Image (tube, rainbow, N blue to C red):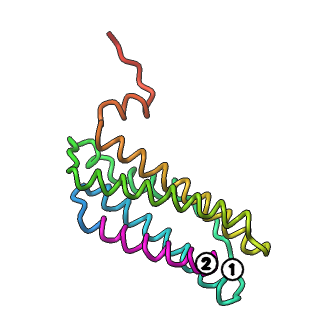
Amino acid sequence: MTALEIARKMETDAIKFYNEAAGKTAYPAGKKMFQTIANDEKRHLEMISQLIKGLEITIQDVSPMKNVKTVFESMKDEMMAKVEASTDELEAFTVAMKMEQEGKEFYRKALSEAKTDKEKALFERLMEDEKQHYQIFANTHQFLSDTGNWFMWEEHSIVEG
């Protein structure tokens, strides 16, 4: 299997996992986040498939962080409600973090072995997107498991005594 074929399989598996996680997640913003990341993975799959077919690809300058930030901003009121994530939801975010970390490492290795400029550009973009996905999942996991401290650190609030 070539690096592109492995990448196609990884992205297909990620899409399936994130869609399933979205279906099982009760937390609305978490559900929307999984759906947004699944759409990113679909975009990755399309770019990989085009390169495999020998077609010209356009590396889209899309920011996963910006997309998810928009999701969370649109659901601000729901996020402010008391959040209690189930163990299964937290586990889904933990698995997602592991998948994104492994994806980033795979694309880093594939980039170092890429033979064409198109492959290099694609693997570089995918590596950056997976890094951002990891950060999104890690931040969400922290938010769901310790909301009070998350707000304190993320919003840089000063605790008054």
Name the one closer to the observer, 40 or 20: 20
Q: Quadrant of the C terminus?
A: top left
For the residues labelled 2 and 1, the Cα–Cα distance comes to 6 Å
Q: Which residue is mark 2?
A: 47
- Residue 28 in percent (x, y) is at 27, 57
- Residue 148 in percent (x, y) is at 30, 31
Please check the rendered image and state whether residue 19 is part of the magenta-colored stretch, yes or no: yes
Q: Residue at point 42% right, 30% down?
A: 153
Quarter residue 45 falls in: bottom right
Q: Residue at point 72% right, 73% down?
A: 119
Name the one closer to the observer, 27 or 114: 114
- In contact (CB < 8 Å): disc 2 and disc 1: yes
Secondary structure, magenta segment, majority class: helix
Q: Earlier in the sequence, mark 2 or mark 1?
A: 2
Q: Which residue is mark 1?
A: 57
Left or right of 109 on screen, residue 102: left
Please check the rendered image and state whether residue 122 is part of the magenta-colored stretch, yes or no: no
- Part of the protein shown in magenta: 1-21
Where is 152 relative to 79, above or below? above
* Count of numbered tags: 2
Name the kind of residue labelled 2 in the image.
Met
Q: Dot 1: what SS?
A: loop
Left or right of 28 on screen, residue 98: right
Q: Quadrant of the N terminus?
A: bottom right
